[in-house]
Amino acid sequence: MSTAGKRTDRWASLDTLRGLGALLVVFHHFALSFFPHTVFGASQRQNAAWESALHTFPGSLLVAGRFAVELFFVLSGFVLSRRFLGERALGDRELAAAVVKRCFRLLPMVWLGIGMVVIASWLGLLHSAAAGAATGSTIWLQPKPEGSVRPLQVALSLLVSPFTRGAQYDSALWTIGYEMVGSLLVFGLVFVARRTPWRWGIYALTAGWLHSESTLPFIAGLVLADLHASFPRFSTWAARSWVAAPVLLGALYLGGYPFAQDEAGRQHWSAWVPQLARLRSGVLVIGAVLVVATVLGNPRLQSLLDCRPGRYLGRISYALYAMHEPVLLTLGCGVYLGLTPQWAHTPAAFTAGAAMLVVSFILAEGGTRWVDLPSQRFANWIAKQYLASLGPAEPASRPHNPPPV
């Protein structure tokens, strides 16, 4: 979920999308903590009158964290598979090396996220329980971590099952386990299907067989990559504004589906097209696919997203995603609790959110430099050692690669 270095190629637009998704998750968790009514509706206390506007579409887009997650998964499916498809595709050796290095690529930031919460717990810096009682966030902002902070249990979580237990400490990390499984699924499908004309049927059968919310976006991203590699016109299918604009608007409507909201919020969203509500989270997957497909098919959108702020946001996206929740549970909740005796809820909450956001960006920059980028280099080194162990291979031209995920 992060990218390395400065990029000026056409894939930088995907970096920006990933960065915007990470920022949306930060907003989502801020809302969950201090204004839970915006996400859950009537089941949670309403702390401000304006929360109703974010509880319904289109305001719900500002707290659409689940939509951002589906966007991450679609992007991963595309980026991981694209360089192994098409006329200049890398071979099976490189595909196997990509599988080998994937765990090393994802794991260090998971360890960092877990470690931050555990250390904060040991030092008594987690204020989520008291803040949850004050804000009414009884569903999400609960006493954390959920996992044991005993040294032996933490060591087991870090070494044996970080991808499955990480969410017990840093709830944002629940997606990384799915990311790992989805990555392996994408690589497996590429290996099995990429050389056969029946691959489109294989993709469809696999999606129907698994029929899982956690795997469909990865398969959808793979399908987008194959379309991009197989049909040159796919790169410009949305080049005209009269095509791109309505598709993006439709995608945003789908992305605003109130996944976690009460029935009133869902009925408001589906008033235009009631049948869509039956798809539930599948609506979010469709919206994410349309966003990525439109960006891939519109050179103007690519140029717009390929900007310095967007590239920077994409560069730190993985670290920001993994590190913002520990900051929220410590600094954010602590600042809020310190201000509420004198301040009203809303100004105290936004001041706490601003402090959390600034520190999260600072720490994300450090985490990117000192953990994420080194993990990328180490994963690449592991892949090179694996390839070297296989002996020399026939020279092959490399495609213009997407950024690492």
Image (cartoon, rainbow, N blue to C red):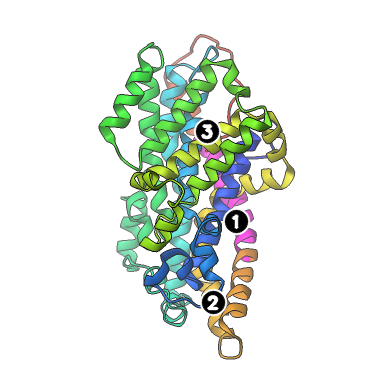
Judged from this view, the residue extending furthest toward the front is 272
Predominant SS of the magenta segment: helix
Question: Who comes first in sequence, dot 3 or dot 2?
Answer: 2
Magenta stretch bounds: 359-379
The residue labelled by disc 1 is: 364
The residue labelled by disc 3 is: 380
Q: CA distance from mark 1 to mark 3?
A: 22 Å
Q: Is residue 197 left or right of residue 25?
A: left
Callout 1: SS: helix
Q: CA distance from mark 3 to mark 2?
A: 49 Å
Foreground label between 1 and 2: 2
Q: Amino acid at mark 3?
A: Asn
Whether residue 326 is visible here, answered yes or no, is: no
Residue at 43% x, 32% y: name it.
220
Which one is in front, 210 or 377?
Answer: 210
Q: Amino acid at mark 2?
A: Ala
Foreground label between 1 and 3: 1
